[in-house]
Amino acid sequence: MKVGVLGGGQLGRMLALAGIPMGFGFRFLDPDGAAPAGHVGELHVGSYEDRAALSNFATGLDVATFEFENVPAKSVLALGGYVLVYPGLVALDQLQDRLSEKTLIRSLGIPTAEFVPLNSAGDLRSLTGLVGLPAVVKTRRFGYDGKDQWVVRSEEECEAIARHLPASPDTLILEGFVDFEREVSLIAARGRRGEMAFYPLAENLHLGGILRRSIAPAPGATAALQQTAERYARQIAEELEYVGVLAVELFERAGELLVNEVAPRVHNSGHWTIEGAETSQFENHLRAISGLPLGSTAARGVSAMWNVLGSPPAAESILEIPGAHLHLYGKAPRAGRKIGHVTVVSTDGSDLAERIERIAAAAPQT
Amino acid sequence: MKVGVLGGGQLGRMLALAGIPMGFGFRFLDPDGAAPAGHVGELHVGSYEDRAALSNFATGLDVATFEFENVPAKSVLALGGYVLVYPGLVALDQLQDRLSEKTLIRSLGIPTAEFVPLNSAGDLRSLTGLVGLPAVVKTRRFGYDGKDQWVVRSEEECEAIARHLPASPDTLILEGFVDFEREVSLIAARGRRGEMAFYPLAENLHLGGILRRSIAPAPGATAALQQTAERYARQIAEELEYVGVLAVELFERAGELLVNEVAPRVHNSGHWTIEGAETSQFENHLRAISGLPLGSTAARGVSAMWNVLGSPPAAESILEIPGAHLHLYGKAPRAGRKIGHVTVVSTDGSDLAERIERIAAAAPQT
């Protein structure tokens, strides 16, 4: 089985590390010749928009996928002329635009934040009335890790913020701010025959728009909460005829769940599954897109995942922590950059907080 | 951390798959340009005896190791002039010759089979008196998977067998046959500062000299049995100032353990640790040789490992079995050749026998 991946970042790299043991081979297309996945597969350096590069990339592949949702839909359309691509174009197209994503979620009757397209910066003040204050202006496309977001706290702020917004029309969305108690995410997998598997909910902590740590299963999450999240994920996946792993980010508020974002790919909040679940999200994505049976999503104990930002910690300081596993992506250090993560698995979770503290001290997120 | 591995077989490949997530890079030296580890690291194709190839191989490495005990001691000696090599030359030299291996074991007061060097085929009949009948003639070096072994059941057979033995002197050993109840193995790791970690004993089944399946922890193994095995492994490792993972194969007979073989490397009977233990034998070997703290060797549930011999099974037939993970090494199919393995992890072991049956049916060992 030869798998092609658009994008050669850490997600592509971890896909390959999950697939090589099963005898899969990997090829990546990435404009960056230093892409982290280049160590574990064939790296084609080229533009996603270059038709000849795509054709060459596709030659001999059994199936293709992508590791980031900002891959141009046109590239996936073109690639689909040469090889099966999962998740498909419909899912990518709907989910890479926050407006169509939110519209889809609402159309399925799934709770989400209030939202309205912001077609002109000048409409900001009048539209806050529709979604309430505080509100958040986001770019409809290409946002990640909290970039390109502006929080509007009062009507008085509207004019000042409007001056900082991009001028081009149809690029923004205004969302009501959800005063959530915590963020959780559900990683789901859907196979080619429509069968689905769901991991336990993870509890996520973001700071400055960047995921800092996840704990899974999410402490205190009830069976009812898990079932609700699974129902939403199933509705979305079935509507999109989705194949592969998909991540649903949710807000929990007063025992209710609101879907915030849906990512058509393996996800940072699912990295704990490498050591913490019977089958990792990466292996299940590969099983799904290649038409193989999905593996068990059961958790092994309780896991915490801690992102390594900026520069790598001393390996010794991490590996001396019981149950800790270090992942480094082979990326150059840079302030705030995700260059790795640490997973720690605890049998019953009782010693997890103390272990996270030790990891946090060894790998400060600066 | 750049690690060099003499040998690019499946063991080297699995070392790399354990080390790449930690940010380690790998280089392999192997005479075979199609060596399975070539997919996961830089492959130098060359002879182990070629000094220039060894020097070139060693350039820029932080540490080196080997994945098979039949690597020429001279190569490790030469390599040691350029880079740290673990396990060291003393361990390799003692353990790659069955006579010095058994002599070491006996000198430590550890039970083992009766043995005597067989310096001339003509001495066979007289020497069987020393070790008893049945007895086994083995080559002192380069035997693996039960190759180059001859069982002597009666004095009458001696002459016929003697005619089939290699003529060169000092190449054979005669051992008493141990009428064991079962075979078990202990995988141990010893770090650079002498710290040790031990996996639970695995129960192994060999047929025709080839390992067929392992179960770990070994069913019914008492704490006393585990402690005895650990004591033997510690004695051997300390005597050899060993660094890395070492595998001790033992016979269990009437509640007692006899050491049969010691392999200075990661071992087939430890493959279950990839999914079945908190830290795999491959990760612990890398931690040990690079001076990092050893990881937990605790088992997750009960695991079975089934070797895939000959040709690969249909992936679907394996992956539909709950808890099963497929490993294929990227080797060309050939009757009897180890080309992969399947691990199945069970929470409490109650469903393990049934799952092994299903794996055996899907991947018959022909």
Image (tube, coloured by chain):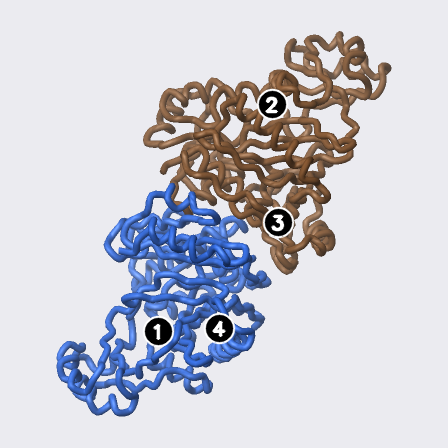
Chain colours: A brown, B blue
Q: Secondary structure at mark 1?
A: loop
Q: Are marks 3 and 2 on the same chain?
A: yes
Q: Are marks 4 and 2 on the same chain?
A: no
- Label 4 – label 3 distance at C-alpha: 29 Å
Give the vertical position of B133 relative to B348 (above or below).
below
Disc marking residue B96: 1
Instruction: In this rendered view, identify the residue nearer to me: A219 or A96.
Output: A219
Q: Identify residue for label 3.
A: A343
Mark 2 belongs to which subunit?
A
Q: Identify residue for label 2.
A: A142
Res. B43 visible in picture: no
Quadrant in the picture for the N terminus of chain A: top left
Which percent across, then down, holds residue B198?
53, 68
Mark 4 and mark 1 lie on one chain; the one further toward the N terminus is 1
Quadrant in the picture for the C terminus of chain A: top right
Instruction: In this rendered view, identify the residue nearer to me: A122 or B363.
Output: B363
Residue that appears at 26% across and 83% down: B134
Mark 3 and mark 2 lie on one chain; the one further toward the N terminus is 2
Q: Identify residue for label 4.
A: B242
Q: Secondary structure at mark 3?
A: strand
Q: Secondary structure at mark 2?
A: loop
- Label 4 – label 2 distance at C-alpha: 53 Å
Which percent across, then down, holds residue A298?
57, 45
Give the vertical position of A260 relative to B214 (above or below).
above
Callout 4 amino acid: Tyr
Discs 4, 2 touching: Cβ within 8 Å: no
- Within 10 Å of the Cα at label 1, are there few (<14), some (14-19), or many (20+) other Cα atoms? many
Q: Closer to us: mark 4 or mark 3?
A: 3
Discs 4, 1 touching: Cβ within 8 Å: no
